[in-house]
Amino acid sequence: MKYVAFTQPGGPDVLHVAEVPTPIAQRGEILIEVEAAGVARADVMQRAGQYPPPPGSSPILGLEVSGVVSALGEGVDGFTAGDRVCALSNGGGYAEYVAVPLGQVLPIPDEWSFIEAASLPENAFTVYDNVFTRARLSKDETLLVHGGTSGIGSMAIMLARAFGAHAIATAGSAKKVAACMEFGAEYAMNYHEVDFVDEIRRYTDSRGVDVVLDIVGGSYIERDIQCLAHDGRITCIAMVDAPLAKIDLRQMIARRASVMASSLRPRTDAQKAAIAQALRERVWPLLPARDLIFPVIDSVFTFSDASQAHRRLESSEHIGKIILVPDPR
C-alpha cells in the first residue's frame, strides 16, 4: 500500500509517498481502507522529531481516519465489511489502509461524507474528554476556548452550545472572530487587538469563566487563572508557547481554581474505547442534523501534497480541519 513517509525529521519537504506492506487486522482490530485522514498538530510535531509515537504504535503519521471496513480481526463484531466508519487510530492514518482497535471505531453519521467524517475523531475525543469529562463543563456554565477556529476550537464551541453551555473564544483575525461566532460562540475577540484577560472581565462583569480550554500553554496559564470564576478549571492540552508555566498560588487559592493537563495519544486502548462509547451515546446522535455540530473543513490535499497540508497547518491561517486523501488508486 502507499503511505506518506519521511526518513528523517525535518520540515514539510521531508514528506513523500512510499510503499509498505498492507497491515493485517489482528485480534480485536478492524482494517480500514482509508478514504480520508485528518491532519493534526501532533503529526507536524512527529514529523519534526518532537513527538515520537508511543511504544507499540505505528510510526506512520495520522491519528484519525474515515473509510470503509476492509477486514475484521478475530473476536470483532458490531461491524461488517463495507461499513462506512471513522476512527481514532494509534498512528498509521496517512496510508491507504490502517488497522485500528475495535473500541476506537465509530460509524460515520448519516449525511456526513468521508472527508467530513475524517474531521471528527481527534477533535471529538479530545474535546469531550478534556472539557466535559475532566473539566466537567456543565449546562449554563461558560467556556473560554483559545484558538476558536482550529479543529479542536471549533468542536469545543459547538459541543458547548449543544450541551447548553456558553462559549467565548479567542482568535487571531477579524475573519476568524466572525467564524467563531458562526460556530456558536456567544462572544469572540481578536487577541491581537485586546487583552483577553481584561476582555473576559469586562464581558462577564468581572465574574470570569468556569472552564478554559488552553491549547497554548506557557505564559497563557497565568493569564487563564486570572480569567476564572470561583471553582473554575483550566484544561491544557498543548504547549505551543512554552513547556513551563508560572502559577500564582494566591490567585489559585482565591478562586478555588484547578489546573489540569492531558494528552490523548498515550492513553490505553481501553481508555480510548471508553471515550468512544461516551461519544456514541451523547454526541453521535446530534450529528446527522448538521445544525448544532457541523463539519468545518479548511482544505483537502492528496497524499502526494502532504507537505502542502503541513505547511497550511503550520501557517495558522486555516479555519477548521485540514484533510488528506489518498492519490487516485
Image: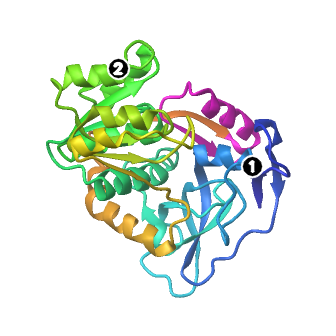
Counting from the top left corner in percent of width and height, residue 194 is at 37, 15
In the rendered structure, which amino acid carries the disc numbered 1? Answer: Gly
Q: Quadrant of residue 147?
A: top left
Labels 1 & 2 near each other (Cβ < 8 A): no
- For the point 37% across and 42% down, the residue is 213
Q: CA distance from mark 1 to mark 2?
A: 34 Å
- For the point 57% across and 43% down, the residue is 243
In the rendered structure, which amino acid carries the disc numbered 2? Answer: Met
Counting from the top left corner in percent of width and height, residue 278 is at 31, 64
Classify the position of the N terminus by image quarter: bottom right
Q: Relative to 48, is 262 on the left or the right?
A: left
Q: Is residue 301 visible?
A: yes
Give the magenta part as a residue range.
Answer: 302-327
Considering the numbered disc 2 on the image, is that residue within a helix, a strand or a loop? strand
- The answer to whether residue 206 is above or below residue 194 is below
Farthest residue, direction front: 250
Circle 1 sits on which residue? Answer: 49
Which disc is residue 59 wearing? none
Q: Residues within 10 Å of mark 1 (few under 14, many from 20)?
A: few
Counting from the top left corner in percent of width and height, residue 97 is at 67, 63
- The answer to whether residue 99 is above or below residue 2 is below
Counting from the top left corner in percent of width and height, residue 98 is at 64, 65
Q: Is 277 in front, or is 188?
A: 188
Task: Find out whether residue 54 is within the magenta segment.
Answer: no
Circle 2 sits on which residue? Answer: 189
